[in-house]
Amino acid sequence: MKSFLLTAAGLALATALSVGGALAQTQGGTLVQITQPEPPNLAPYVSTSGPIAQVTSKVFDGLLEYNFDLEPQPSLAESWEVSADGLTITFNLRDDVVFHDGTPLTSEDVRFTIMDVLREAHPRGIATFRNVIAVETPDRHTAIFRLDAPAPYLMMALNSAESPILPAHIYAEGDIRAHGNANEPIGSGPFVFTEWRRGEFVRLDRNDNYWRDGQPYLDRIVVRFIADASTRTAVLEQGEAHVAGFGAVPYQDVRRLEALDTIEVTTRGYEMISPIVEMIFNTQEPPFDNQMVRQAVNYAIDRQFVIDNVWFGYGVPASGPISSNFEPSGLFGRGIDFSVPDRIDIANRLLDEAGFPRGADGIRFEITHDVTPYGEEWQRFGEITVQNLAEIGIRATLRYEDLPTWLARTYTDYDFQLTSNFLFNQADPVIGVHRGIHSDRILPGTVFVNGSRWSSPETDALMDAATVATNAATRQQAYQALVPLVTEASPVAYVLELRYPTVHSTQFADVITSPIGIYGNYAFAHQR
Amino acid sequence: MKSFNARFYGNPRVYLGLAWLALVAVVAIFAGVFAPRDPFAIVGQPFLPPGSEGFLLGTDSLGRNVLAGLIHGARTTLMIAVLSTVAAVAFGTVLGALAGYYGGIVDDILMRLTEFFQTIPWFLFAIVLVAILSPSAMNLVIAIAVVSWPPIARVVRAEVMAVKAREFVQAAVVAGQRDMGILFGQILPNTLSPLIVTGSLMVATAILIESALSFLGLGAPGQMSWGFQIGAGRSFLRDAWWLVTVPGIVILLTVLAINLIGEGLNDALNPRLADL
């Protein structure tokens, strides 16, 4: 009781103080972020392992930032201009940016980063910057991208998490894939890398020479790594950590934390990530070489049940390969609605027509259903799928293997019938959507590409048009036409758009300020 | 001296163990009668507490009947435990008997092999085996048997070596019986009592291994088991206590029952120990 009174008094005092200082943002404070799992390195320019950029996006800057409508905003580039033919992009860089070692940023750093690092060694950058044939540097603060074909999606891939701008004088020395600074990043961002104690935390301290005057507000960010899920929840509950996202907190725990006064939960901050839970059919082998069978399975899945009971409400039914996060930008289309009330009847009819009548035991045929080996949500999803398929006379047996075996089965040997899968749309459909359905992404041995091996000349042409079109309306039309065709063919059952919850302490404000959420740089985050 | 029956059935703890195990066995055998529906079937609202209408032990996170899961889990768990024990006992007995009977180089080779298996931490070994073989009921039996046979082999070897020196064995040798006839006809029947005790206790260990593997998500997919129920429910410990508590208690009671029976057998078969 005594401690409660003390706490109450402390809260009252804190409230009084914060009201008094409401006009200026409070300086100082240490924000503790939970990142799960611990990153393998701090080299986001050669590795796209998820946790890395949750740390390094605070250390590096990108040429651009983005608002929630996915519109580019100035960052290192004060202004920019895309030529009408889409083949020249001119960036005017700020002249007051210095790297953490005191060296000023110049256009040479941009050229080096794009041409020598990202275009050569970044797993996604190789594709994103493929059309960039040169970066010209007419003066210290102008960088001109020369392209041999338009690449409108490139303008969506320039934030600090995806394309961090590196100081050339440091990273140009030696092999970029095994660089001495791979675990001690040096950038120009709002926070300076100070220490990485393995298995425990990374400490980032305020960059006093940050180019945004007066920012960042925080003195320090500590990124903690806690392997046990219930400990992560407890630490957040007790206020020892202040922000966590990307499934770091079990979904059912988020519901409990949400009820606390000290914690806020938001599903914003994933608009440029757009995770989609889906199921891939092996379209080259019976029974799923039959479009009607694939559609029947698509109808059979009880999407809302999966959302409510596996992901505890953090999702919406998917309406096709493209996330509804792209709806504001128009790069979106709506396919067949598989969640109609009479979906089970439709599915049964489709299977009858496809020539798979029910046997005496009510079974039409048997399949093996592989489960994405990402943890227990995926097992529950698989168990629900087995039940859903039983309703339409398909007996499915679950198979749960380790990640390398599952990846080889799905993307190298194609030795599967139906498997769940998890793909991110990323910042643009060209980057995140085409890979799953385009014929040029049927690449045995390459993971997270077109595993269904379905394609059609018509859909390929629409995607090719959307890739190079410099006119937004043309791209929109292409995607509006593409999505109904893809859902009709159903090479993939798009089940739900996962809306990851980000849990953060009410002690801090303006933490999640961009469509990349905890991949943001926290320059604006401050204590309440 | 009292007879085996008097010593075994005169022990009240044996009764408790037998009663519980008989109940579990009956439930396992007639699982389809007690709970005709697929235990994975989604039959109600998720997270209904025990005592809810129609769900004596409540429902799990997907609305599956916990009681139906326990009933079908009894079948999976017992079947895997018994089969793997039978396999381990058979293999361990043959190896131990050969080593003990022939001695010398045969003994050296077989016992070094046994020791090799004994030096590997058995639970990690089971995990690795299941991961490599991919989880299925058959592979669980194999994995549990592979990690369980070494103690059997050692027990049998020691017994065979002791019995081999006895006069009736020498008489059989003199009478011209073949090695295999002597080993399996004369010696092994006289080593049965420690074997029965070790084997019965091993069923309990096998249940624990199966449950632990299922808890880790390495159980037979598509087959309900007690360990699976605990594994699937552990994330909800704070929200739905019954999901782990109920199958946990059932595992506890079953393992305890087998141990009581095993100890009862031990006391009855080794009267000198029992009198100590």
Image (cartoon, helix red, strand yellow):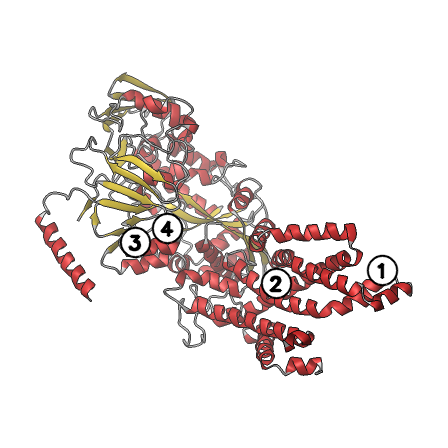
What is the spatial separation of the Cα atoms under label 4 and label 1, in whole angstroms? 65 Å
Q: Are marks 3 and 2 on the same chain?
A: yes
Foreground residue among A262 and A139? A262
* Tag in front: 4 or 3: 3
Task: Identify the mark nearer the N-term, 4 or 3.
Answer: 3
* Tag in front: 4 or 1: 1
Q: Are marks 4 and 3 on the same chain?
A: yes
User: Mark 3 and 1 residues: CB-CB less than 8 Å, in contact?
Assistant: no
Q: Which residue is under mark 3?
A: A236
User: Mark 1 and 2 residues: CB-CB less than 8 Å, in contact?
Assistant: no
Q: Secondary structure at mark 2?
A: loop
Q: On screen, A498 above or below A302?
A: above
Mark 1 packing: few (<14 Cα in 10 Å), some, or many (20+)?
few
What is the spatial separation of the Cα atoms under label 1 and label 2, in whole angstroms? 56 Å
Q: Which residue is under mark 1?
A: B179
**Disc 4: which chain?**
A
Q: Is residue A250 visible?
A: no
Q: Which mark is residue A13?
A: none
Q: On screen, B129 above or below B64?
A: above
Q: Amino acid at mark 2?
A: Gly
* Tag in front: 3 or 1: 1
What is the spatial separation of the Cα atoms under label 4 and label 2, in whole angstroms? 42 Å
Q: Residue furthest front?
A: B276
* Tag in front: 3 or 2: 3
Q: Secondary structure at mark 1?
A: helix
Q: Is residue B246 visible?
A: yes
* Tag in front: 4 or 2: 4
Q: Amino acid at mark 3?
A: Leu
Task: Identify the mark nearer the N-term, 4 or 2.
Answer: 4
Q: Amino acid at mark 4?
A: Gly
**Disc 1: which chain?**
B
Q: Secondary structure at mark 4?
A: loop
